[in-house]
Amino acid sequence: MSLSWPGPGRYALSLDTPGFYLLLLLLGTFGLMLILLRRAYPGRKRGIEGFFEVASIDLGFLVSGLVLVVALVLAEPHANRTGLALYEVVIGGYWFSFSIPIVTVGTSVHRRSRGGVPWMVPSLAVAAALFVGLFAFYFVSA
């Protein structure tokens, strides 16, 4: 059981899964929220800034997860263990469930304290550690 780059293998990857559709639904919900905010409160710059201040973290995670999953499925519809583990980390949703709130809170505290409470980097480190931990779990269990 050796770790290698994602490549061809015996594990089928598909975008036709509830996890993928949920990911698209979440991204669509953020888009709808932004549209409603702009239509209901046109010209309210602070509202839009507030939306992007908080939503930028979530959107960054969700878009990067979407790009990773789509790239994996398009590159290798039948992947090796590494590809499967990366796919499962995102599609399973557990990484998003824990990492997004941790990084959102850490970044918000950091920004609001103007760096006086330096939680942004530690929260990103926790999110990265969660990714590695879940990747290892899926890799070993494949």
Image: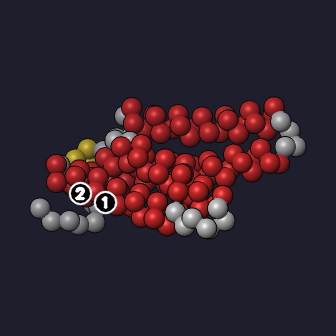
Q: Secondary structure at mark 1?
A: helix
Q: Which residue is mark 1?
A: 132
Q: Which residue is mark 2?
A: 136
> In front here: 17 or 52?
52
Mark 1 belongs to which amino acid? Val
Q: Is residue 25 above or below residue 47?
A: above
Q: Quadrant of the N terminus?
A: bottom left
Mark 2 belongs to which amino acid? Ala
Residue count near mark 1 (Cα–Cα under 10 Å), binned few <14, some 14–19, many ≥20: some
Q: Is residue 41 above or below residue 63?
A: above
Name the residue located 72 percent from the left edge and 48 percent from the top edge: 50
List the single residue furthest toward the right: 43
> In front here: 96 or 77?
96
Instruction: Examine the rendering and report whether any part of residue 63 can be seen.
Output: no
Name the residue located 84 percent from the left edge and 43 percent from the top edge: 44
Residue count near mark 2 (Cα–Cα under 10 Å), binned few <14, some 14–19, many ≥20: some
User: Residue 7 at x, y = what percent?
Assistant: 27, 60
The reply to whether dot 2 and dot 1 touch (C-beta < 8 Å) is yes
User: Residue 31 at x, y = what percent?
Assistant: 65, 39
User: Residue 32 at x, y = what percent?
Assistant: 66, 34
User: Residue 47 at x, y = what percent?
Assistant: 77, 44
